[in-house]
Image: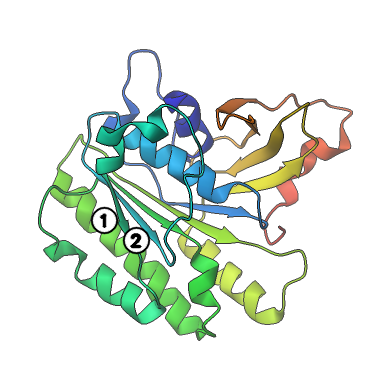
Amino acid sequence: MAEKLRQVLSPGRAAGPGEKNAAEVEPPLLLLGGPGSGKTALLFAVALEAAGDGRGPVLFLTRSPLQSLPCRTPAALDPLRLQKIRFQYPPSTRELLQFLCSAHETPGPVPSLLLLDGLEEYLAEDLEPQEVAYLAALLLDTAAHFSHRVGPGQGYGLIVALQTQEERDSGDALHLSLLQRYFPAQCWLHFDTPGPGQCCRRACLEPGGQGPRAEWLVAFQPDGEMTITPWPTQADDPSSNKCSSSRGLP
């Protein structure tokens, strides 16, 4: 499961036999999808896997506390893993910026992964384009600082989740365009026809020139388990080109 998650959300090259992805610094990634597309569940699954692979703690930023665990797997109920996930809830863009600016002063072990869920809630504060650009740059700078502190060969990651809508106004489109400049690697989550008792998503990884484009089928089972398999692309399937036209679309 851990290897599959890394492949879905890793714009860089996939690890070969015997290699450890934890030793690589992953390019920052923008996770995009509509309401209910599974962004939070996927981020939480990534946090659990990272918390269990022997690296440092995971820093999980979101505006509002999670009302319930996005998945109910054994890993999600492991207290040792949950203790390694540091949840922080900046209530506004101002507090988020302040937190990122002071992150280098945070005591304790250096985080190995920075996750931000619900970026759209901060963008809803009618931020000017230069403020959006500053926030994106500060996220990248914070991730670079943590990467430097953990040292060479330890790896570091940054994933930011943003909700998209079918119909966006010009301000939303401008914000997304700005973010794509800072996050050329993106993973889009599309709704897919589920199997019996399943909730399925089509994950389309656009690596931004840092690797091959890839597609995956992410299925959420009723018991909370998540399965990830390669997307069965067919040459005569018109939807197989859906990822290539994902930029700027939900």
Report if residue 130 is visible in the image.
yes
The residue beneath circle 1 is 144
The residue beneath circle 2 is 140
Q: Position of residue 73 (x, y in %)?
A: 47, 29
Q: Position of residue 38 (x, y in %)?
A: 60, 46
Camera-nearest residue between 13 and 2: 2
Numbered disc 1: secondary structure: helix
Tell me if 12 is positioned left or right of 175 in this view.
Answer: left
Camera-nearest residue between 188 and 234: 188
Camera-nearest residue between 70 and 62: 70
Tell whether label 1 touches label 2 (CB within 8 Å). Answer: yes
Seen in the picture, residue 158 relative to 56 is either above or below; the reply is: below
Separation of disc 2 and disc 1 at Cα? 6 Å
> Which image quadrant is residue 230 in?
top right
**What amino acid is labelled 1 in the image?**
Ala
**What residue do we see at 59% from left, 68% from top?**
176
Camera-nearest residue between 246 and 54: 54
**What amino acid is labelled 2 in the image?**
Leu
**What residue do we see at 51% from left, 38% from top?**
71
Report if residue 24 is visible in the image.
no
> Which image quadrant is residue 21 in?
top left
Q: Position of residue 98 (x, y in %)?
A: 27, 76
Mark 2: few/some/many CA within 10 Å (<14, 14-19, 20+): some
Q: Position of residue 102 (x, y in %)?
A: 19, 70
Mark 1: few/some/many CA within 10 Å (<14, 14-19, 20+): some
Numbered disc 2: secondary structure: helix
Of the 4 image quadrants, the one containing the C terminus is bottom right
